[in-house]
Image (tube, helix red, strand yellow):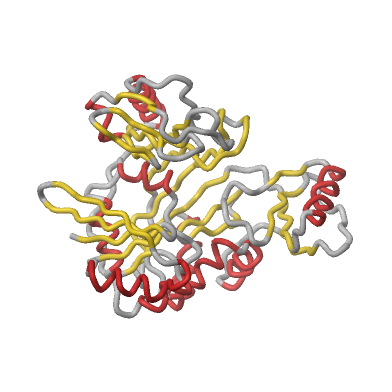
Amino acid sequence: MKYLLIPNQQALLVQINGEGHSVESISLDANHGYTSLQKTIASFTPDSIIVTSTRLGSLMDVFRAKQAITGSTKVTDALSNNVAYGLASFAACSIPNVNHVLLHSNGEKLEQVSKKGYVFCPVDAVGLDDEIVCRDWQQLLLLTSLYHQRGGDSYVLRDIVDDDTLWITSWFNGRDFYLPTASSINYHLYDNMGPVTNMPSCLTWGINKDNQLFIEMQKAKKLLHLAGYRGPVSIRFNGGLAERWYASYLPSYLAGLSELLQGSLADLIYTISRGEKVHEGLRGGYGMSVGLSIPPFPYEGNGKGMTVFGVEKPALKHLWLDDVVYNNGVIVIDNAEGRIGYVTARGDNPEKARWRVKRTISRLDCHGLQYNLV
């Protein structure tokens, strides 16, 4: 099976067979995206194309009619990246969503309405770790003023709900949803404290099709079908109200899901990309993934080329490495921020999954290892 993985302008050609797999990296020409990608597809002839970026929808839509593609369409990129558009789409799909207001930084006057405060989010927010909670009114006024001074334009203020936040994720094959799950994701570096990072911890478990939040998600079928989208779809709910879309691949979710799948993740992606029915199911219990990093992450540093740790063989199947080189049991960082990847485990309950994650981490020989447990 041949997969073309496109996270950005650097594509990966992945071949999987009964004897193992091979990976080859190629660069796509940013100035001639269509021609460059067309040549790559023609020479490699992939069985499935996986796009993990949420910025390539306009380009990928050109190839979608003749290729089996998951991820990134022009419409779903807007859902993921434009907070105001995403919230408006919830209303269009009749999905209950949090109370919010769209404002501009051109002197538009703020009125204090919510007693709990607001969640501030730029309209063109790309990451899921870019929201700022403001419970103090003067803090919010200062934040919006600084945002305007730095050239920011529009932003959204959402009411703080102060309730359980859950990501509901399911796989859409162009017509139906499969394998619905719920996930609790913690983006803080140290439990619920410390800096927000893009190496979170995630706890995932399967949910029934009659789960009320999944029922709400299914109202988006027509929108996703018209967009031509296939792949994982995630909606973040707070207190039963939708507040954020992410129509792409969440690494922390994928790592945890791998512990629950009865089949392989590669086979699931291939099936979804071809618009076919998913017959495999989920194992019971909970899948956990925990992001690993070393200082100075999440700050810029000189981590590239640093030897991180040796790995005991039993731990390998529970490691999802990110921007590192693995060579004869030794992991070397290949980025400047200190990202390592994820450790995963499954347990009949969250406590058991957490204990197994800790056990795997204890088998990693790494000085200054940073992680949090959801």
- Considering only vertical position in the picture, is 191 above or below 162? above
Query: In the image shown, does 266 or 117 lie closer to the viewer?
Result: 266
Q: Is residue 225 visible?
A: yes
| 54 vs 336, nearest the viewer | 336
Name the outermost residue toward the left: 19
Q: In the picture, residue 34 is in which quadrant?
A: bottom left
Would residue 129 be found to the left or right of residue 261 on screen? right
Question: Residue 270 in the image: x percent, y percent?
Answer: 26, 62
User: Can residue 275 be spotted in the picture?
Assistant: no
Residue at the spot 57% in from the left edge and 37% down from the top edge? 300
- Location of residue 128 in the rendering, given as x and y in whole percent from the top left corner: 57, 50
Question: Compared with residue 316, is residue 19 higher up or lower down, i.e. above or below?
Answer: below
Instruction: Please provide percent x and percent y for residue 108.
Output: 86, 63
Vertical side of 226 occupied by 346: above or below = above
Q: Quadrant of residue 8?
A: bottom left
In this picture, is 72 found above or below 114?
A: below
Q: Nearer the viewer, residue 5 or 165?
A: 5
Q: Quadrant of residue 233?
A: bottom left
Split into 4 quadrants, where in the image is the N terminus? bottom left
| Residue 202 or residue 6, whichever sits in front | 6
Judge left or right: residue 140 versus residue 331: right
Please give the name of the residue rendered at 30% of the width and 64% of the height, measured from the top-left corner.
272
x then y, percent, for residue 296: 55, 30
